[in-house]
Amino acid sequence: MSSPFTFKPLEIPPELEPLREQVREFLREAGRDWSGWKVGHSWTGFDKDFSRAVADKSWIGMTWPTQYGGGERSHLERHVVVEEMLAAGAPLGAHWFGDRQSGPLLLRLGTEEQRRRFLPAIARGEASFCIGLSEPNSGSDLASIRAKAVRTDGGWLLTGTKIWTTNAHLCDYMIGLFRTGGGDTKVKHEGLSQFLIDMKTPGIEVRPIRDLTGENHFNEVFFDEAFVPDDMLVGEEGNGWKQATSELAFERSQPDRFMSCFPVLPELVDAINKRGSPDRLAAREIGATVADLVILREMSLSVLGQLAEGKTPAREAALVKDLGNSHEQQIPNLARDLLDLPATIEQGNRLSELEGILTQNVPSYSLRGGTREILRGIIAKGLGLR
């Protein structure tokens, strides 16, 4: 029986090694004073100055056409840059969502006016995006959203609530999914549309959600008849479900889904080596973890190849994300077990700070981008089990 999943091998050619070295040199200088706490935030860390420095290197919007501020470089070149940024725990949050998914969405489905207005701003590191999908009391059932957009003179009035919106309190724009009606209202996947929303629009209120760390990169966003002009509709009215789910393939298969905790590994190896030769348990556990990482990287590269060909590998991306959850969530435990670390955070100790922030954050990794239950439902459907 043929496999319902496609993971065609894709290799990064050796001629991209000079680019990798350029990125590493840039990060050595930029990250000289980063604490373990800052590194532990990685792609959720919001630092506009850093994003502008990355933009100055032409490393945002790398694959986009030059007419929209891009570099017309290959997807593999972008992958090299992303890998190195995540390996260093760089604070990518101010441009991450725009570069990873909002920009590509506009490139595929946006109007010419939208592309010319927003893509160059993203590529310059100036425009930050958040994603408005989840809602309170909807669990993981994205199609059950109740936030609505009602037609008015010259545009739409948005009413409702979005939740778990990363960095909404800091971002300039949101791409949000709202119910616009149309079709059979009993079919909840129909009648959904996406909008480009200026976060400074009157009628929008952002409230922080404090997590275990005391921080609030998650937010709840309230819309009270917030006006969005007609020309800020993204793609086709009523086609939002298909657009949003195809966008999730970019989100679920990227290296951030298995590299968020990577900076712990080199620190852990160094700490073990300082104690002398690693014992058999440490060698075995670290070896198994690195083997998992290699497999996930190969799977992610394969999905990248399919996305570059214009395909929508939703099942493959769900598999990468689900396996990546398990890989990432065990890394802080690995450090704690192999080094017998105390349950405290020692300020100034890079590994202790990393282990501390990630221990508090990793429970959320199986929620972001789709819960385990949703992902495994997609995988089961691909296997013909439901």
Image: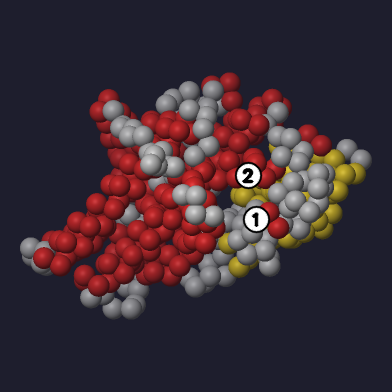
Report the side of 198 relative to 61 (left or right).
Answer: right
Q: What is the x, y in percent for residue 283?
A: 15, 61
Q: Residue at x 49, y 64 (%)?
A: 364
| Quarter placement of the C terminus | bottom right
Element at label 1: helix
Report the side of 280 relative to 249 (left or right).
Answer: left
Q: What is the x, y in percent for residue 18?
A: 28, 29
Question: As shown in the figure, which amino acid type bears the numbered disc 2?
Answer: Ala
Element at label 2: helix
CB-based contact (under 8 Å), mark 1 and mark 2: yes
- Foreground residue among 140 and 82: 140
Of callouts 1 and 2, the N-terminal one: 1
Q: Quadrant of residue 156?
A: top right
* 186 w.r.t. 239: above or below: below
| Disc ID at residue 142 | 1
What residue occupies the far right of the structure in this picture? Answer: 153
What residue occupies the far left of the structure in this picture? Answer: 277
| Disc ID at residue 244 | 2
Q: Residue at x 37, y 52 (%)?
A: 259
Q: Neighbour class for label 1 at 10 Å: few (<14), some, many (≥20)?
A: some
- Foreground residue among 23 and 301: 301
Q: Which colour scheme is used?
A: secondary structure
Q: Neighbour class for label 2 at 10 Å: few (<14), some, many (≥20)?
A: many
| Quarter placement of the N terminus | top left
Q: What is the x, y in percent for residue 163?
A: 65, 61
Report the side of 181 relative to 314 (left or right).
Answer: right
